[in-house]
Image (cartoon, rainbow, N blue to C red):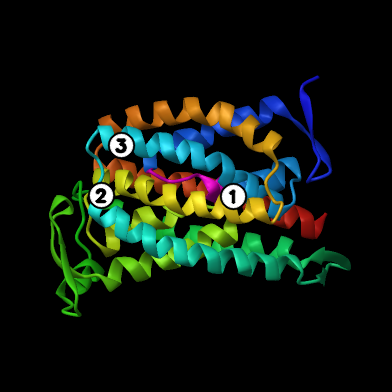
Amino acid sequence: MLTVELPLAGIEVWVPGLIALGIFIGFLTGLFGVGGGFLLTPFLRILFNVPYPVAVGSGLAQMLITASLSAWRHWQARNTDPKLGTIMAVGALAGTEVGVRLLRILDTGGAIVLNSREFPVIDMVMPVIFLILMVAIAVTILKETSGQQGSQEVVTPACRYFRSLRMQPLLSFEKSGIASMPLWVPLFLSCSVGVLTGLLGIGGGFVNFPLLVYALGVPTHLAVGTSAFQILFATAYGALRHALAHHVDLALALAILVGSIAGVQLGVRVCHVLGGRRIRRYFAFVILLGVVVILAGLLGDVLG
């Protein structure tokens, strides 16, 4: 009664569990301007045994709706730099296509033997990629926010370097406080994030948000809204490409969506009352939660 069959995945899943996961993912989307796929994809695989291609495609499909809602709410709150977000969306679309093709290669990559057991290559490679990215981002944010004198906003050496470049064409992003920066900087960074969107089923926000803050020097609240704006386009393209590849299970996407819509509303409200430094620090703790779950699942598969 409380389960639903997923024809593409060939399994049955517990619907209340999917709804609860959706609430959590939606809350992260509203609070941090991230799609939540950096937790949704591995959680679907580890907790519900959904194959990675279906988890990626279905996750992107539901994220399209929650990302739209989050982007709209942050737009209303004037937390978005539309000029910067549009440029980054263009780069993300190109990168997403590359990521989709990489996932297809991994899905047909055969198997490897660990601890006298055979595992599909994709089931081993995907968690390792997640772990490397998540640990690196969490450590960077925690290091920056751990000082007693830490400010609400941060200007890093990388930010100063990118703003000092004089490669043409140069653009200004007044709302983000960027007087001059080459067009190629946000394009290249967003293209890299787009690769992760297509490959890992993430909106790219968990990488895009810290890039906006630490590489471009965008104020935290604006980074949240601009990230939400940018991932809307990346998730739309990624969801379409995976739907064409028959990786989207509508029943799975809808169950998660039911919870995530409510979660987004709460996340946006909480974002308004938190300072930039606290938002960044809480974001790092959420990422570390994902690291623990992914690592536990990976070790359980190999050692079990």
Measured along the vertical axis of the image, is residue 1 above or below residue 30? above
3D distance between C-alphas at marks 3 and 1:
30 Å
**Can you say which quadrant of the picture contains the C terminus?**
bottom right
Q: Nearer the viewer, mark 3 or mark 1?
A: 3
- Name the secondary structure under disc 2: helix
**Quick one: quadrant of the N terminus?**
top right
Is residue 15 part of the magenta span, yes or no?
Answer: no
Q: Secondary structure at mark 3?
A: helix
Residue type for callout 2: Pro
Instruction: Tell which of 195 and 42 is nearer to you.
Output: 195
Percent position (x, y) of residue 63?
52, 42
In the rendering, at what x and y percent does residue 88 appear?
34, 60
Instruction: List the residue tagged with mark 1.
Output: 292
Q: Which portion, as a residue range, is magenta?
A: 33-40
Q: Is residue 37 left or right of residue 211?
A: right
- Given contact means CB atoms under 8 Å apart, are the residues at marks 3 and 2 in contact? no
Q: CA distance from mark 2 to mark 1?
A: 35 Å
For residue 1, above or below residue 259? above
Q: Which residue is mark 3?
A: 74
- Few, some or many C-alpha atoms within 10 Å of disc 1 (few <14, some 14-19, many ≥20)? few
Q: Quadrant of residue 19?
A: top right
